[in-house]
């Protein structure tokens, strides 16, 4: 019995050694083949085609070329600087997320998710930039103009000073715009927010030849005021006409004060 057990143990050990050698040989052989493989194609995906875009395929190719200073076609897979390429896109101000990888067919994939602007900022110095849905700044792009609401007026903050918006003023304006864009009715109405010298916010709607004074920026309860404005639109303007008043003042807690247009 002891002899049979010893033979079984020896055979098992020998089998394990043979298996390990076979795996090592396969790995070395596969590594050698991998060194000989070359990049067949570069495949670029730019995410949601319906969203506003700052970059097209040509821009991606230009960034790609600058990051490697060479063509990738027919280049050995082992020589592709995948991490460097991914970093080049991840540090681009128009890119939210980037993913670069090589598939089983030796194609290099570049998947780009662009930042989505929700408003264009025009500060008091007439400097333009965008903010995205995460309250981060995006520089303007001469190739593309995104049709988004405008926040303008007495705004000090510029595009510099870090990626995220810094001032409480702009953070509050961002909250107002984000709320309005989340409601179908107000998304359709939001054209511009203007911050005047007194720190009051004026809404310029798309429909109606009037402006809406929301009140002091830091005292605005946007949900409550828009509810009040909706009631006034339905029960007031629907009867007297959308172009009757020059201004609609919502800064008072319990009333809506309107100023009629002057006769010309």
Image (tube, rainbow, N blue to C red):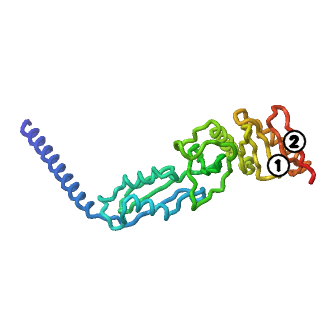
Residue 151 in sight in this render: yes
In the image, 86 versus 11, the foreground residue is 86
**Residue 258 bears which disc, if any?**
2
148 on left or right of 263: left
Q: Quadrant of the C terminus?
A: bottom right
Left or right of residue 8, residue 142 in this image: right
Left or right: residue 122 versus residue 54 is: right
Disc 1 marks which residue?
Answer: 210
Residue 162 in percent (x, y) is at 52, 42
Determine whether the residue tagged by mark 1 lies in a helix, strand or loop. Answer: loop
Q: Could you tell me if the residues under marks 1 and 2 are in contact, i.e. CB atoms within 8 Å?
A: no
**Residue pictured at 39% horizontal, 60% vertical:** 108
Residue under the point 49% across and 59% down: 45
Q: Closer to the camera, 55 or 138?
A: 138
Farthest residue to the front: give it.
125
Q: Residue at 85% across / 47% down in the picture?
A: 246
Residue at screen point 74% across, 37% down:
198
Residue 172, given in percent of the width and then of the height, sits at 66, 38
């Amino acid at each position: 019995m002891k002899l049979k057990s010893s033979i079984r143990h020896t055979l098992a050990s020998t089998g394990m050694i043979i298996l390990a050698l076979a795996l090592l040989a396969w790995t070395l052989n596969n590594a050698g083949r991998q060194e000989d493989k070359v990049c067949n194609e570069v495949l670029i995906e730019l995410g949601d085609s319906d969203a506003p875009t700052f970059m097209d395929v040509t821009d991606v190719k230009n960034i790609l070329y600058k990051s490697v200073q060479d063509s990738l076609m027919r280049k050995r897979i082992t020589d592709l600087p995948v991490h460097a390429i991914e970093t080049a896109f991840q540090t681009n101000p128009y890119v939210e997320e980037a993913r670069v990888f090589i598939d089983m067919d030796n194609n290099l994939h570049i998947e780009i998710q662009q930042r989505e602007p929700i408003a264009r900022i025009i500060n008091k110095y007439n400097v333009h930039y965008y903010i995205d849905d995460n309250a981060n700044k995006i520089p303007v792009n001469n190739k593309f103009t995104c049709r988004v609401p405008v926040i303008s007026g007495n705004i000090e903050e510029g595009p510099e000073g870090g990626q995220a918006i810094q001032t409480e003023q702009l953070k509050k304006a961002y909250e107002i715009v984000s709320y309005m864009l989340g409601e179908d009715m107000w998304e359709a109405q939001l054209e511009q927010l203007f911050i005047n010298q007194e720190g009051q916010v004026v809404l310029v709607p798309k429909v109606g030849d009037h402006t809406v004074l929301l009140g002091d920026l830091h005292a605005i309860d946007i949900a409550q005021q828009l509810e009040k404005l909706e009631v006034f639109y339905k029960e007031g303007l629907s009867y007297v006409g959308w172009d009757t008043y020059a201004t609609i003042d919502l800064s008072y807690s319990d009333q809506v004060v309107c100023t009629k247009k002057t006769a010309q």
